[in-house]
Amino acid sequence: MLSNIGIPGLILILILALIVFGPKKLPEIGKATGQTIREFKKSTKELTSDVVEEFDEVKKEVKDLKN
């Protein structure tokens, strides 16, 4: 999705954000966005590890049933 924007589009978006939110609010918005992305990645990693853990347990049970 972002690969289609390009440098000119990104600059235009940043200028519009600067106009709409102002120079004082923009760093706060960037920080909040960074924290949100970090939390999302953390939650995704935890969810993935839980699924892998469950899969390994089921795989082990199936292997035990075969023997």
Image (tube, rainbow, N blue to C red):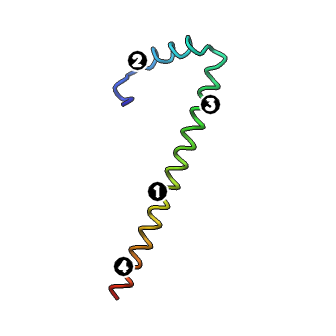
Of mark 1 and mark 4, the one earlier in the sequence is 1
Please identify, in this view, whether the residue under mark 3 or under mark 4 is nearer the observer: 4
Amino acid identity at mark 1: Thr
Sequence-first tag of 3 and 2: 2
Q: CA distance from mark 3 to mark 2?
A: 22 Å
Which tag is nearer the camera, tag 1 or tag 2?
1
- Name the front one of labels 4 and 2: 4
- The residue singled out by tag 1 in the image is 48
**Viewed as shown, does residue 56 lie left or right of 25?**
left
- Specify the quadrant that holds the C terminus: bottom left
Q: Disc 2 marks which amino acid?
A: Gly
Q: Position of residue 25 (x, y in %)?
A: 64, 19
At a point 50% along the width and 53% down the height, the residue shown is 45
Q: Which residue is drawn at the image coordinates 56% and 42% (left, top)?
A: 38
Q: Is residue 66 above or below residue 16?
A: below
Q: Residue at x 49, y 50 (%)?
A: 44
Tag 3 residue:
31
Q: Earlier in the sequence, mark 1 or mark 2?
A: 2
Name the residue carrying label 2.
9
Question: 29 or 5, which is in the foreground?
Answer: 29
Identify the disc placed on residue 62.
4
| Residue drawn at x 41%, y 73% as measured from the top left | 58
Label 2 residue SS: helix
Instruction: State the image coordinates of residue 51 (x, y, percent, origin top left).
Output: 45, 61
Between the C-alphas of marks 3 and 1, the distance is 26 Å
Q: Is residue 41 above or below residue 21?
A: below
